[in-house]
Image (tube, rainbow, N blue to C red):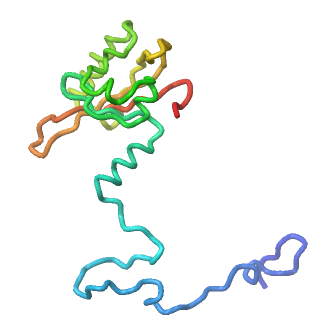
């Protein structure tokens, strides 16, 4: 007979929606080019993410600040979270050393971060507490990690940093 809901004489089986059978072609239309080796895609689904635009949108949507630094620590790229964190415009920060915006007592941490990148970073990365100074003079406590990014030739190309505000998320 099946299980009954409390206070009901209906079985769980009868309460569940019954499956609907439809031809496969309705759910998975064939590709316009019959020789194209694609997996079927539901009509309402989006193709897999693969473009640089999709990656940029993903990085922009992250709750943490993401920075690309050259090998000397100067800012090459960053998502808007980093600029909001420091309360500064993108144009003010690009090309400048990230250490320039840290509290002076925290500058040795950047040496630790550089050592971490030399060791390979990534994986179980070490997080270092770094305070940054906003344009209005207030400080923002963060934790930061650095990982190396390699070019197609395998050589170190730039550094990727993740900066997480510790008190609250910055809009």
Q: Position of residue 14 (x, y in %)?
A: 75, 84
Left or right: residue 62 versus residue 91 is: right
The image quarter containing residue 133 is top left
Q: Residue at x 12, y 41 (%)?
A: 154
Residue furthest top as drawn: 105
Q: Residue at x 32, y 84 (%)?
A: 31
The image quarter containing residue 109 is top left
Residue furthest right as drawn: 7
Give the camera-side residue of 94 and 143. 94
Q: How many marks?
A: 0
Q: Residue at x 27, y 25 (%)?
A: 116
Give the camera-side residue of 84 and 127. 84
Left or right: residue 63 versus residue 93 is: right
Q: Residue at x 31, y 29 (%)?
A: 146
Q: Position of residue 85 (x, y in %)?
A: 45, 26
Q: Is residue 160 visible?
A: no
Image quadrant occupied by the N terminus = bottom right
Q: Position of residue 160 (x, y in %)?
A: 29, 34
Left or right: residue 30 versus residue 75 is: right
Q: Position of residue 24 (x, y in %)?
A: 45, 89
Give the camera-side residue of 24 and 13. 24
Q: Is residue 14 visible?
A: yes
């Amino acid at each position: 007979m099946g299980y009954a809901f409390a206070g009901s004489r209906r079985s769980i089986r009868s309460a569940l929606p019954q499956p609907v059978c439809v031809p496969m072609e309705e759910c998975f239309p064939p590709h316009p080019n019959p020789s194209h080796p694609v997996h079927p895609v539901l009509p309402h689904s989006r193709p897999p993410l693969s473009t640089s635009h999709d990656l940029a949108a993903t990085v922009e949507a992250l709750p943490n600040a993401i920075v690309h630094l050259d090998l000397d620590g100067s800012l090459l790229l960053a998502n808007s979270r980093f600029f909001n964190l420091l309360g500064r415009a993108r144009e003010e920060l690009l090309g400048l050393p990230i250490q320039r915006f840290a509290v002076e007592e925290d500058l040795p941490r950047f040496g630790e971060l550089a050592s971490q990148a030399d060791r390979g970073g990534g994986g179980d990365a070490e997080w270092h507490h770094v305070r940054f100074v906003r344009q209005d003079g207030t400080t923002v406590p963060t934790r930061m990690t650095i990982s190396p990014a390699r070019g197609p030739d395998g050589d170190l190309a730039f550094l990727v940093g993740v900066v997480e505000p510790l008190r609250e998320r910055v809009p």
